[in-house]
Amino acid sequence: MKTIHILNGDCLAEQLKVTKINQDFIICRECLIDGNISADNLSEFWEVRAKFISEIFGADDYHKQVVLEFAKIARIPKSSEVCLWFENDLFCQTNLWFVLSLLSKQTNLKLFRIFPVIENETDIWKGFGISKTETLEKAYKSKVIFQTQDIELGTNLWDAYQSHDFIKLKELSKQNSACFRYLEEVCDAHIDRFPKNNSMNRPEKVIKEIIKSGSNDFQKVFAEFSAREGIYGFGDLQLKEIFERLI
């Protein structure tokens, strides 16, 4: 039985290279927490994402670096084990939901969720970034199998997220699944990005509070925001756009 690992980013691939875990990797190089995700089909979706990535990050190799990597999912041999290495924050979850929507079209695959081993409760949003070789191997040995209902939940979460259906997203977040931790908190954090009135959203409010406390240095604001709101999993590029608008 072949084992394939789908990883949320190249950094994790580098970490896993020094473990005893096999090296058949598919890298998810997306940030679906950010930018336009509306599309009627997958081909249109890739075009929408390529345009966004090019405009924001100045990268013109989206097809080579991202689309061709995702295309490997359709070529996973039947009866393979597929291990999904994704963290619990919103950044990773949106990517995971999308990957599950792609995998759901495959048959005869055995899917597993690999959770980061978190030894200190204050580190719950730091994910695999703080993992050592032994904790990565421990995480792999503790993998959780996706049952049919878990895969359906993941694909439904993606549909609700992509269509901005917050009512459906809230409803789905209350379902219990061993494959999704902190799901309700994560979905609430996303919904809080879009208040019904014209007030500031949750990330904006927190950044504004940090700035008001006397810190105008972006790196300090980023560190403090990550400490308070690690649930979002924002990278510096996502946060900088908000920071510069508020400053």
Image (spheres, rainbow, N blue to C red):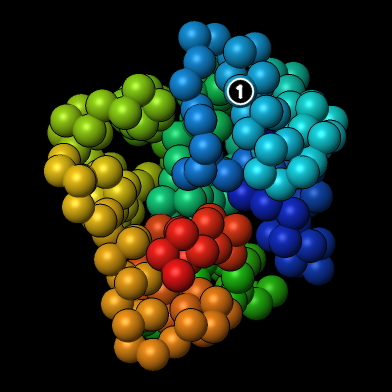
Depth check: give the residue in front, 196 or 23: 196
Note whether 175 is above or below 135 in the view shown.
above
Image-based side of 197 in relation to 229, left or right: left
Residue 67 place in picture, x, y as percent: 74, 27
Examine the image and state in which quarter residue 10 appears. Answer: bottom right
Task: Work out whether residue 175 can be spotted.
Answer: no
Looking at the picture, does residue 159 appear above or below residue 27? above
Q: Foreground: 13 or 158?
A: 158
* Residue at image location 69% in from the left, 38% down from the top: 55
Identify the residue at image location x=54%, y=83%: 217
Circle 1 sits in a helix, a strand or a loop, which is it? helix
Depth order, front residue of 222/87:
222
Q: Look at label 1 and name its amino acid.
A: Val
Is residue 4 rendered to the left or right of residue 234? right
On the question of residue 165 being in view, the answer is yes
In the image, is residue 227 above or below residue 235? below
The image position of residue 176, as x and y in percent, is: 21, 43
Specify few, some or many for label 1: CA neighbours under 10 Å numbering under 14, 14-19, or 20 or more. Answer: some
Label total for image: 1
Would you identify the image quadrant in which residue 148 lies?
top left
Quadrant for the N terminus, please. top right
Q: Residue 64: x and y, percent? A: 84, 31
**Observer-nearest of 206 and 1:** 206
Q: Quadrant of the C terminus?
A: bottom left
Q: Residue 69: where, in percent of width, then height?
A: 76, 32
Residue at the location (43% across, 81% down)?
Answer: 224
Question: Which residue bears the numbered disc 1?
Answer: 48
Task: Give me the residue at 31% from left, 28% from top.
Answer: 164
Q: Quadrant of residue 155?
A: top left
